[in-house]
């Protein structure tokens, strides 16, 4: 299963037989992970429910994508998972503007004495998901829920409403779905009459824009295919990291970058104050109640790290993480980094598909020859391949210069390329 | 007669092949533009729609098709904020996702109902994605594809497609 295996070497049926000798016991009965795809895609299984025991964000997103592509077109599937600390950006976002990439890197390189790190939580993974939307932070106090359903049945709110019903049954009366299809907790002080069945209003709802602002506890994103719709979302139950999340989501380069694509809308966040396990169970019950009309869930099972042996999941995992860094970096919509010449290094760089397309200088200290050398070396390069601008410029400049060193330092700070995964 | 048409077609192909093609350094594959003598049948020359809500329209010579998403799809997606366009000169097979549209936190694949090579993309959509909500079946086309085969999937006329969306 090395990543270097040839494409198409392992095809579904044939490859899966190899694993069927490994039995595993799951909550829903005896099911080996080898039969996971068969069970998942069986047309008879109209209602399925899975929980992941893995906390690997790349794996959980790949299992989720596998569910989206393999589940029967008319089925509805619930999938619950918790990820280790990671920052997850949307499909069409710019990691350099959305994420403080420098501190992800720092934590990884010094993860052995993680406690001395300013954020104090060790390595934080960086992930680009396949769905749209903005950047979110995950950790062990955040439950991710996802529902894959027929595209014709899909609305952006229906499953957020399901989650609000689950929260209210656990006593969280101030939870509601807002106009951005997110779940918020109202913070109003006065209790006003409100229909308890209305999942878009609570007794504490205040007028739009009025204070106190509701706290966001769940953010949604979607992936739509021909026949299917995937709705996945975070749920901040008991994150120990709320106070440091803003540090991870504040990029020092943001004010210098003009980017196409999708910009995150930042919102004040809060913890709901529930433990992960009881909420998982409540959510499974609420899902069962919502779809009782289809019948009882045919499949209730756990999935985990061993599912990485399923070729299709492995392929998705490698695309997201291992084989190339292209999905993270080259998928970035076109952007310009603009640093003025008055109080900065005087550079304009255009990056398209992750490749440096142009580099212009407005700094009189740099000789024409040096500009030419830097431009010659960097235009056409993948930005992700320049891990150290200092080393890069040292290699390509025929003479040294203080200005060039300053340029290298600045670019290294603004455009860091952290490693993906340990 | 058939032979003469083929000669005319081959001549046109040669002329178009000598036109300078846009160079994009980002494309690692840099394949040579292949000679294609394929052209689709007359029945496809009116605008056709797929069940996935894409439309295609053949050029007069039957060699290139313009692809976009339908008005129905553009309306259903809501405000489009970003469009991932296919890469130029990419070989595509029928049913492939050649790009994606993002609207209201949703990524939706753009599928091609026809095989061929991406000859042109509507770059304006990169900076003005909202155009796709204004004129999805006109100015906001997505790509032009030099076709290499007849589509095998179901293609519908405007009337059939309208009936299809009303049923959905």
Image: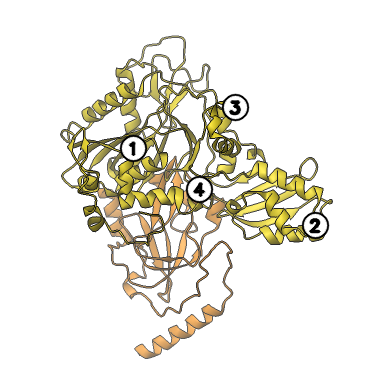
Chain colours: A yellow, B orange
Q: Which residue is mark 3?
A: A118
Whether labels 3 and 1 share one chain: yes
Q: Position of residue A358 (x, y in %)?
A: 67, 57
Quadrant of the image occupied by residue B104: top left
What secondary structure is found at the residue carrying circle 4?
helix
Q: Which residue is mark 4?
A: A328
Q: Give the chain of mark 3.
A: A
Residue at (24, 50) in percent of width and height: A19
Residue at (31, 62) in percent of width and height: B157
Q: Position of residue A17 (x, y in %)?
A: 21, 54
Judging depth in this view, the residue of B105 and A405 nearest the camera is: A405
| Residues tagged 3 and 1 counted as in contact (Cβ below 8 A) | no
N-terminal label among 3 and 2: 3
What secondary structure is found at the residue carrying circle 1?
loop
Q: Which residue is mark 1?
A: A155
Judging depth in this view, the residue of A95 and A319 nearest the camera is: A319
Q: Which residue is mark 2?
A: A399
Of circles 4 and 1, the one toward us is 4
Of circles 3 and 1, the one toward us is 3
Q: Give the chain of mark 4.
A: A
N-terminal label among 4 and 1: 1
Whether labels 4 and 1 share one chain: yes
Judging depth in this view, the residue of A172 and A400 nearest the camera is: A400
Q: Give the chain of mark 2.
A: A
């Amino acid at each position: 299963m090395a990543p270097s295996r040839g494409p198409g070497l392992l095809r579904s049926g044939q490859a899966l037989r190899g694993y069927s000798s490994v039995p595993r016991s799951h909550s829903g009965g005896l099911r080996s992970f080898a039969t996971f795809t068969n069970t998942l895609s069986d047309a008879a299984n109209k209602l399925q429910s899975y929980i992941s025991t893995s906390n690997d964000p790349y794996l959980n997103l790949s299992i989720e994508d596998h569910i989206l592509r393999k589940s029967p077109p008319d089925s509805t599937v619930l999938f619950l998972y918790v990820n280790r600390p990671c920052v997850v950006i949307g499909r069409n976002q710019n990691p350099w503007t959305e994420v403080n990439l420098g501190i992800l890197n720092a934590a990884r390189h010094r993860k052995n004495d993680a406690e001395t790190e300013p954020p104090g939580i060790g390595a934080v993974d960086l992930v680009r998901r396949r769905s749209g939307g903005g950047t979110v932070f995950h950790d062990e106090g955040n439950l991710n829920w996802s529902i894959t359903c027929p595209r014709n049945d899909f609305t952006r709110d229906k499953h957020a409403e399901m989650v609000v019903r689950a929260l209210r049954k656990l006593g969280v009366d101030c939870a509601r779905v807002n106009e951005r299809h997110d779940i918020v907790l109202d913070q109003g002080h006065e209790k006003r009459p409100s229909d308890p069945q209305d999942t878009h209003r609570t007794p504490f709802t205040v007028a739009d824009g009025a204070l106190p602002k509701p706290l966001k506890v769940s953010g949604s994103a979607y992936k739509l295919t021909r026949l299917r719709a995937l709705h996945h979302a975070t749920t901040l139950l008991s994150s120990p990291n709320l106070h440091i999340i803003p540090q991870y989501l504040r990029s020092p380069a943001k004010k210098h970058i003009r980017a196409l694509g999708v910009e995150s809308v930042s919102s004040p966040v809060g913890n709901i104050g529930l433990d992960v396990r009881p909420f998982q169970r409540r959510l499974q019950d609420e899902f069962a109640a919502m779809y009782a009309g289809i019948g009882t869930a045919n499949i209730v099972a756990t999935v985990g790290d061993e599912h990485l042996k399923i070729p299709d999941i492995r392929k998705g995992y490698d695309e997201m993480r291992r084989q190339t860094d292209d999905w993270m970096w080259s998928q970035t919509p076109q952007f310009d980094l603009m640093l003025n010449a008055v109080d900065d290094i005087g550079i304009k760089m255009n990056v398209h598909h992750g490749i440096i397309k142009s580099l212009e200088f407005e700094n009189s200290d740099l000789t024409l020859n040096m500009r030419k050398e830097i431009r010659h070396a960097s235009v056409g390069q993948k930005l992700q391949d320049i891990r150290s601008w200092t080393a890069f410029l040292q290699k390509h400049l025929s003479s040294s210069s203080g200005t060039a060193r300053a340029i290298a330092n600045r670019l290294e700070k603004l455009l860091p390329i952290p490693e993906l995964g340990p | 007669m058939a032979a003469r048409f083929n000669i005319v077609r081959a001549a046109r192909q040669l002329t178009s092949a000598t036109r300078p093609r846009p160079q994009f350094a980002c494309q690692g594959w840099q394949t040579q533009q292949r000679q294609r003598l394929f052209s689709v049948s007359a029945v496809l020359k009116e605008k056709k729609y797929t069940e996935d809500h894409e439309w295609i329209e053949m050029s007069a010579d039957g060699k290139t098709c313009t692809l976009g998403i339908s008005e129905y799809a553009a309306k259903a997606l809501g405000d489009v904020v970003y469009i991932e366009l296919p890469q130029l000169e990419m070989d595509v097979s029928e049913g492939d996702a050649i790009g994606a549209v993002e609207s209201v936190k949703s990524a939706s694949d753009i599928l091609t109902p026809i095989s061929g090579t991406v000859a042109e993309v509507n770059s304006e959509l990169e900076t003005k994605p909202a155009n796709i909500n204004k004129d999805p079946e006109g100015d906001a086309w997505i790509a032009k594809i030099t076709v290499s085969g007849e589509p095998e999937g179901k293609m519908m006329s405007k009337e059939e497609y309208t009936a299809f969306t009303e049923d959905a």
